[in-house]
Image (cartoon, rainbow, N blue to C red):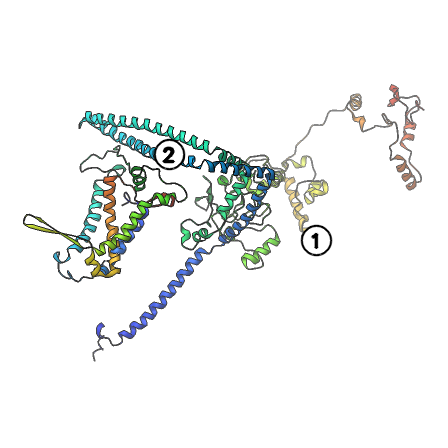
Amino acid sequence: MLVYFDPWLAGVVFPSLIIVGLMAIPYIDTNPKGNGYFTFKERKVEITLFLFGFLILWVLLVTLGTFLRGPNWNFFGPYEYWDLHKLLALNNVNLSEYFWVKMLHMKLPSGPLGMWIRELPGILLTLFYIGVLPGILAMTRKTWTIKLGSRTFTMTFGLRKYFEKLGPWRYSIFVMLLLCMIALPIKMVLRWTLNLKYIVSLPEIFFNI
Amino acid sequence: MAPPSKPEPGRDPNMADRARKLNVVFALTSIAMLVAFTVMIWADYDREWKKYQKDFVRLEIGVTQKQAQQAKDKVPTAQQQALQAELDRAKQEEAQRRDQIKKAQGERDKLEGEWYAIDQNFRFTKAEIDVKRYDYEEAAHKNKGNKDKKLADLKDYEERWEKLRVQLEDVNARKDAKDKEIAQLESTRLDAEKKSKELFGDYNRYEDRLQKIKPGFVTTVRNLPVLDLANPSLKVNQIMPANLQDDVIFSGTPKVDRCTTCHLGIDKKGFENEKQPFKTHPNLAFYLQGPHPIDKVGCTSCHQGRGRATGFMSAVHIPSTAAQEKQWGKDYSKSDTYHPFHFWDYPMMAKGHTEAQCVKCHQGQVEIPKAASLNTGRLLFEKYGCYGCHKVKGWEDLRKVGPDLTKIVSKTSEEWIYRWIKKPSAFRPTRMPQVWDVRTPDQDTQAFLARNNVEANAVVAYLVEKSGRETYPDPPAGDLAQGRKTFETIGCLACHRVGPDRRGVTRPCPTAPRAKAWTRRRSAPTAPTSTARAARSTPAGSTRGCATRRGTGTRRGCRTCA
């Protein structure tokens, strides 16, 4: 996490959220189905979410971090020689640089409010992610059915069902924990694909997302 | 009879009542814990030094305002007015050129964006080149992979980098040209502002300082309990001089001096007349800002006391006068006398005693500058031979101040030794201490006095008994003629006369008549005067001892001259 997030997020906020979130699971998920017996069919989403958090974000990342990260925190393939001198270019760019310099061909805003204007795209995006997206998800439920040969797969977007089932408070907590959890793989993918360093980068006040 | 069975949890009729009681206990303990927690946070927050820091901010604002006003008053009014007029004129001119300036600044901003993109690309390409070079060298070294392709790749990146370098130089040149153009358009204003900065340099500096120290909403929030963990304006200041340690018995810990947490004006000019703890250190140029820099020497190296402390008592302050001791007792010890913190081995040196610490560093220096008391003390210490009994580093191997007594009886007698050791100062002024008869008269009883004599006699007996004897050869017999010659040639006659010889005396002593009258009054049968004696003893015609022998003048009482 420390590779992809600012230390205060990766070291303080997220670990706290993980502990609080794990403690909150019994209060959010009050569905009695699955008590005393094993079932996947009745708890597909819940079990998938839990296993994503446990197997992918925890076990897999610990395994990869242990066996595939070598000297200088560089990535090495399985059986690749761990060369101390291996070089990797870390040409990462902040979202503000993408927006102002690469898209608008302008200099980064300066002046007394410069840092806030500079980071406005990232701030708006973050606010959208944690402020607007939960609302959109609460109101949406779209289902697509895909036929592959004799089998059909159903894809659903939106969490309206959960909003109705959990009520506004429990839904808000659930969706916040979910979005925070998903933020980690999102950030990892953005780093690998777009060399994105920070979405919001305010080193002036030691705040980065 | 079987004991009554314990009711099952679900069937206990008193359970609800017990739960209510338990709720009350929980509520009370929770409240108690909350109160304890609040008190704990407040106790941690409410520190003695914060009060001093708040007082100092108020003081510093006053002093800085005064200094700013003085700096402003230094600039003559005519000059101020001329500068203001120049600034106004420059602003008017700039207003006329506003469109031109705005356009140029827009272009400049675009260039800045262009530069940023090229510069970033340039740096990123350099990083890529390093990676490509690593890949190629690895392939060449291990003869693995397609090294020719990797080399071509590297060359390709290097060419790109070269092109970017040219682009970067080009954009930098255009940026500079645009900067010059803007500076030209704004030259009048810039010139006027430069003059203003030069003229009001000191004033501006004081004003900036004022803005920085004036408390406001943000400062208040920064200093709130708990929030003050981030970046408070009231905070402990500390100096950690490199390579200096405090001796805490069996181990040394790095010296940390937090004295400047309260002594806030110690290294600032302008607080010379303030009360402690805000007073400026005396002779700043020689101490904190001179050869004893505060960041390298710290405070406790010279003053002692507990550097890590942030409270008056725990820093082990020591009073310098009886009145101060009484006052501090009232203020800090809540009693008539002051009881300093006794857990620290090195209490602070009282005012006036700090020089004692100079020797820590100035070992072996004959005279330490600005340490008159210490220098005098060291001289006296050596002169009186204190090191004979008191072991002091650096004074171990000096000779003893008293004379060798191995052969004392060769030159003195028992009687003399007795008189000398009983009261050395009775014989002559001396640094030899008196050992007996030193009690006050009411303490010195007859029994004590008798005992003193016995002890002194015992010491005399011991010295005489242990003393060896030195025999000195008799001096050779004197030669009368040679003696006279020497006496007359080496200058003895300048002060002495022998017999009737009155050479060089041409007039009576100015006090002689009075002395004569006095002697006449006192003694009727007068003894023959020196003149009469001379007249009687000098044979007629003799010129021995007479200065006129060389024709230098007459002498009263000399027969030849008379």
Of the 4 image quadrants, the one containing the N terminus of chain A is top left
Residue situated furthest left in the rendering = A150
* Amino acid on which disc 1 is placed: Pro
User: A202 left or right of A44?
Assistant: right
Q: In this figure, what is the number of numbered marks?
A: 2
Residue B392 visible in this rendered orientation of the protein: no
Quadrant in which residue B462 is drawn:
top right
Q: Where is residue B433 in the image (x, y as percent from the top left)?
A: 65, 43
User: B452 left or right of A172?
Assistant: right
Q: Position of residue B307 (x, y in %)?
A: 49, 47
Gap between marks 1 and 2, in whole Å?
103 Å
Residue situated furthest top in the rendering = B550
Pointers 1 and 2 in contact (C-beta within 8 Å): no
Q: Where is residue A2 in the image (x, y as percent from the top left)?
A: 29, 44
Residue B47 visible in this rendered orientation of the protein: yes
User: A147 left or right of B209?
Assistant: left
The circle on residue B107 is 2
